Each structure stands twice: as structure tokens, then as C-alpha cells.
Image (cartoon, rainbow, N blue to C red):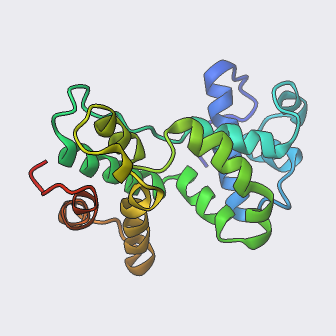
């Protein structure tokens, strides 16, 4: 056992983080359909009355945790390093996929019942509000700056990098290397928007 005493009173960000961590662990273990305020509270060593002060139900706790733990790409403001920004965005995605939040999303989307309950809210309230798919924020930024024709940024193009990183994770169970990420950018994303690897 660790040194943390569950009776210690936690407030503010420390308490919220404990609850967020707890709901992410809980959904991986029991699934969305069996997620309860009691289960989250027990795992967070927090009374369920504390949860109800902030959230109306366990799905709201889960969505809040996923929103706050979903990273957002930050493209170079000058829009002068598209290749580097894309590689960094894919690295961010790979790191997130192996995090508690990423594992929770994988558990939700690979379970048909959980996906039916959560997928719409997940995409609307988490992904869309945090930049959408990985690389989309970067690509949109560069398109807005006129670095490539905006009409080339289709939904398929926006998803190429994420799809290939996901395939790598599924196929090997290990994160892609920097060489893997560079190959995805150079051989798939940049050609799709009419640019070479030095963009």
C-alpha cells in the first residue's frame, strides 16, 4: 500500500484529479454499462455525495475526465514546420493512446454496447472540443495560412495519420518509433495534400 491516506481531505484540483483517475480506471474494468457513482467514489476514496455536487451521473464524470485529459495539438504559430508539427501531433496521439484516458477510450469504442451509449457524446463533447482527430488541428492551421489548398483537407486526409498509428498499436502492441511517425507523415499525409517531405 502507498502512503496516501484515503481519509485525508482533498479539495480542488487534487480531488478532481483523483476522481478523474478513478473513473478512467473504473470504465476499463467494468465498462460503461456498469459504471456507477458508488464504484467511482470507492475507487477515488470519495463519498458519492461529493460526486453529485459536480456531476449528475457517472457518464458525466467520465466525459469530464476524458475532456480534461485529452491533449490538443499546438501547431507552430508561424506555420513554417508542417512536417515537424505533424510528427509531433502523431507522437502526442501515440502517447495519449497508451495513457489511462486513451485506454479508457479504447475500452469504450471496442465494446459495442459502450460505443452505442457513448460514441456520439465522446466525439461531440471531447474530441470536437479538443481539436478533433490528431493532426486535424495542425492541417487546418496550415490550410488557413495558405500553405496548401484547403479543399485537400478532407475527412479521409485528416484521419490518415491517426488510422495508421492505431493500426501500428493494434498490430504490434507497442508505440510507433520516430521513424514510423516520419514515414507516416512523408509517405501518407504530405502526399495526400500535394506536398513532399520537406514541407
Image position of 164 (left or right of 84): right
Q: Nearer the viewer, residue 33 or 20?
A: 33
Q: 113 above or below 162?
A: below
Q: Quadrant of residue 16?
A: top right
Q: Nearer the viewer, residue 18 or 173?
A: 173
Image position of 133 (left or right of 124): left
Residue at the far top: name it. 12
Q: Quadrant of residue 58?
A: top right
Q: Nearer the viewer, residue 1 or 29?
A: 29
- Residue at 61% across, 38% down: 67
Residue 3: tell me if it is visible: no
Please provide percent x and percent y for residue 119: 70, 57
Q: 24 above or below 31?
A: above
Please provide percent x and percent y for residue 65: 65, 40
Q: In this figure, what is the number of numbered marks?
A: 0
Image position of 133 (left or right of 141): right
- Residue at 56% across, 59% down: 103
Residue 21: tell me if it is visible: yes
Residue at the far left: name it. 198
- Residue at 68% across, 34% down: 5
Residue at the far bottom: name it. 171
Q: 100 above or below 14?
A: below
Please provide percent x and percent y for residue 113: 80, 69
Q: 193 above or below 77?
A: below
Please provide percent x and percent y for residue 142: 28, 38
- Residue at 66% across, 19% down: 12
Q: Nearer the viewer, residue 124 or 69?
A: 124
Amino acid at each position: 500500500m502507498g502512503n496516501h491516506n484515503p481519509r485525508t481531505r482533498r479539495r480542488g484540483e487534487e480531488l478532481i484529479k483523483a476522481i478523474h483517475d478513478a473513473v478512467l480506471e473504473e470504465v476499463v474494468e467494468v465498462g460503461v454499462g456498469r459504471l456507477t457513482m458508488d464504484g467511482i467514489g470507492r475507487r477515488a476514496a470519495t463519498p458519492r455525495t461529493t460526486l453529485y455536487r459536480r456531476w449528475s451521473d457517472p457518464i458525466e464524470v467520465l466525459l469530464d475526465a476524458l475532456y480534461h485529459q485529452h491533449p490538443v495539438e499546438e501547431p507552430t504559430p508561424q506555420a513554417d514546420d508542417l512536417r515537424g508539427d505533424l510528427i509531433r501531433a502523431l507522437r502526442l496521439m501515440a502517447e495519449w493512446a497508451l495513457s489511462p484516458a486513451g485506454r479508457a477510450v479504447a475500452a469504450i469504442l471496442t465494446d459495442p454496447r459502450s460505443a452505442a451509449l457513448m460514441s456520439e457524446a465522446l466525439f461531440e463533447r471531447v474530441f470536437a472540443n479538443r481539436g478533433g482527430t490528431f493532426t486535424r488541428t495542425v492541417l487546418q492551421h496550415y490550410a488557413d495560412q495558405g500553405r496548401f489548398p484547403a479543399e485537400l483537407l478532407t475527412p479521409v486526409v485528416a484521419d490518415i495519420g491517426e488510422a495508421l498509428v492505431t493500426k501500428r498499436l493494434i498490430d504490434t502492441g507497442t508505440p510507433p518509433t520516430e521513424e514510423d511517425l516520419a514515414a507516416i507523415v512523408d509517405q501518407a499525409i504530405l502526399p495526400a495534400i500535394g506536398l513532399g517531405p520537406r514541407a
